[in-house]
């Protein structure tokens, strides 16, 4: 670290200096100290450098939560490369689009994901697939081979404004967009999140949040910044999580509303000892106040809401750990991030206190722009640096922000973002479909689920089962519509634009509908 510069790769180095042999990570039966994570990520960085992967190269990270994902993440940063973390649920075809879009030099994937990915990457320009986990497929480089050898560890010094990650959002226009985030943006977000939540070295954090998601990512990075122990799970299971909180004497649990819904419904809750918890956080989508109160009553600690977005590399707002907590509010803006409410159609005009408008934010955490998409960048970031979030909200005199609605058509299901246009693009590929529209509808467990409305092509008679199979072949499981409603026509404006809000009336009619889950 030079001149106060702090890169993503410096987080495990500083943690090793400060906390050494203390347990950094618990992953199933394996525990790693801060020293071990630092050494392993050094070796991984050296292995990448020996293969010609270095400053400015893009490296995709595609796999399940686990110690190897974290070692790879910090190793990529230490090599001077740009981290491209992608959702492990994406299909190989979706990953290939991202690889092509941002010019990836290498893909680091779990063995389970790589088997299907290897043939899809042919001709992509991605020179190798490095697999972690058991059974690396033929034609790939085994993870362990990058952890051995005497290659020098690259220096990670440099300008903190340089590109650190390219994180892809779901596609508002049918394809995802890569938010370019500097090292400064990521590390500033981590520091301010840790400050607001009072994170500390004696915290033991239980999390099943996906590490590629900005929420899971900031939880991981904050643990290394503060010297906390992260107890990580590859997937969420309510009974397992409750058992881990009790067994590990966890001080924090972090999740999305769907997770809390299942925790409250779990038969294991009655006997669970949750007395060690000091704080829980919830984000990803709105959570009913009554449900938040039920969590606090049983968990015996505050549950504080937060809000973030890919374009910020983590959180944008939350509540200070010492309070006050205002259920139903996403809290106040993080330090070094400004927030204001503007007219939805005119970002230059502020709305009066308490009035609804579009939430705009500005500061060091805001992305540099969307990779290869200057027009989308201009639409998102104003000339004076304000980022248009697309969320409708209001702010009170104390700076507490309450979300009201979404300006965009994004669907939030179990904390995952889904954009209808992406689903519509895939559905349109089916030969039996003439037109389609997708909208979100309430679901008690997931918050919202996507429902597709289909106009069949003349002479064709596609079924919901066929469309579900088609979508599963091209989309991550959480994006696949939960129902298919066959209609004669779709509601449109005079200009031919689909009226998504009018789809609710069509949805209330139950005939000619196929449910898939």
Image (cartoon, helix red, strand yellow):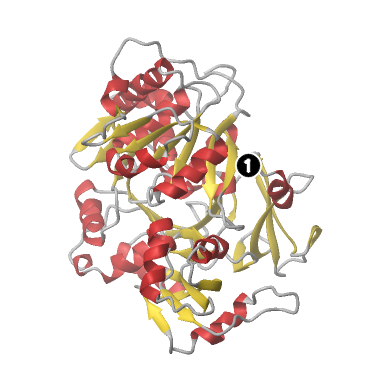
Q: 24 or 508, which lies in front?
A: 508
Label 1 sits on residue: 367
- How far across and how far down the image is residue 477, in percent? 38, 60
User: Which residue is drawn at the image coordinates 69% and 46% (left, top)?
Assistant: 377
Q: Position of residue 173 (x, y in %)?
A: 61, 57
Examine the rendered structure and indicate whether residue 461 appears above or below residue 340: below
Residue at the right extreme, as displayed: 349
Decide if residue 492 is on the left or right side of residue 155.
Answer: right
Tell me the SS state at disc 1: loop
Give the residue displayed 25% in from the left and 52% down from the top. Answer: 245
Task: Looking at the picture, tell me which residue is in the foreground, 50 or 192.
Answer: 50
Does residue 216 show up? yes
At 74% from the left and 66% from the top, the residue drawn is: 353
Query: Which image quarter is the C terminus in?
Result: bottom left
Q: Is residue 198 visible?
A: no
Is 387 situated above or below 293? above
- Whether residue 31 sits left or right of residue 289 in the image: it is left
């Amino acid at each position: 670290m030079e001149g106060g510069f702090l890169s993503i790769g410096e987080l495990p180095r500083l943690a090793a200096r400060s906390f050494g042999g203390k347990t950094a990570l618990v992953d199933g039966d394996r525990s790693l100290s801060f020293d071990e994570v630092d050494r392993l990520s050094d070796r991984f960085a050296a292995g990448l450098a020996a293969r010609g992967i270095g400053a400015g190269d893009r490296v995709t990270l595609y796999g399940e939560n686990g110690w190897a994902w974290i070692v790879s993440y910090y190793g990529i940063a230490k090599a001077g490369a740009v981290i491209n973390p992608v959702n492990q649920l994406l299909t190989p075809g979706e990953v290939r689009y991202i690889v092509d879009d941002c010019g990836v030099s290498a893909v680091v994937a779990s063995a389970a994901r790589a088997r299907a990915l290897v043939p899809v990457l042919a001709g992509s320009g991605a020179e190798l697939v490095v697999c972690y986990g058991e059974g690396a497929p033929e034609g790939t480089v085994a993870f362990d081979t990058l952890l051995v050898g005497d290659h020098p560890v690259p220096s990670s010094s440099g300008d903190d404004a340089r590109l650190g990650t390219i994180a892809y959002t779901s596609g508002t226009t049918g394809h995802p967009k890569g938010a370019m985030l500097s090292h400064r943006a990521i590390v500033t977000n981590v520091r301010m999140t840790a400050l607001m939540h009072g994170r500390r070295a004696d915290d033991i954090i239980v999390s099943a949040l996906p590490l590629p998601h900005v929420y899971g990512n900031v939880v991981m990075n904050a643990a290394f910044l503060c010297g906390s122990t992260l107890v990580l799970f590859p997937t969420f299971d309510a009974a397992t999580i409750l058992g881990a909180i009790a067994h590990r004497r966890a001080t924090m649990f972090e999740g999305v509303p769907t997770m809390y819904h299942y925790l409250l419904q779990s038969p294991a809750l009655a006997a669970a000892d949750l007395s060690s918890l000091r704080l829980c956080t919830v984000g990803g989508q709105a959570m009913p106040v009554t449900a938040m109160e039920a969590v606090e009553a049983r968990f015996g600690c505050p549950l504080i809401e937060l809000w973030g977005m890919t374009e910020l590399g983590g959180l944008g707002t939350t509540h200070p750990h010492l309070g006050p907590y205002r259920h139903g509010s996403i809290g106040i803006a993080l330090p070094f991030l400004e927030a204001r409410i503007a007219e939805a159609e005119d970002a230059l005009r502020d709305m009066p206190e308490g009035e609804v408008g579009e939430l705009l934010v500005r500061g060091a955490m805001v992305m540099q722009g969307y990779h290869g998409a200057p027009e989308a960048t201009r639409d998102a970031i104003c000339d004076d640096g304000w980022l248009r979030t697309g969320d409708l909200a209001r702010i009170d005199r104390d700076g507490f922000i309450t979300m009201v609605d979404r300006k965009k058509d994004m669907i939030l299901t179990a904390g995952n973002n889904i954009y209808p246009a992406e689903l519509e693009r895939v559905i349109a590929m089916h030969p039996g479909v003439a037109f389609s529209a997708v909208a979100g509808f309430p679901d008690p467990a997931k918050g919202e689920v996507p429902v597709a409305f289909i106009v069949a092509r003349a002479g064709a008679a596609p079924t919901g089962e066929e469309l579900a199979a088609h979508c599963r072949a091209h989309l991550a499981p959480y994006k696949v519509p939960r129902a298919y409603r066959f209609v004669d026509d779709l509601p449109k404006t005079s200009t031919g634009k689909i009226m998504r809000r009018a789809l609710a009336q069509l949805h209330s009619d139950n005939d000619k509908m196929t449910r898939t889950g």
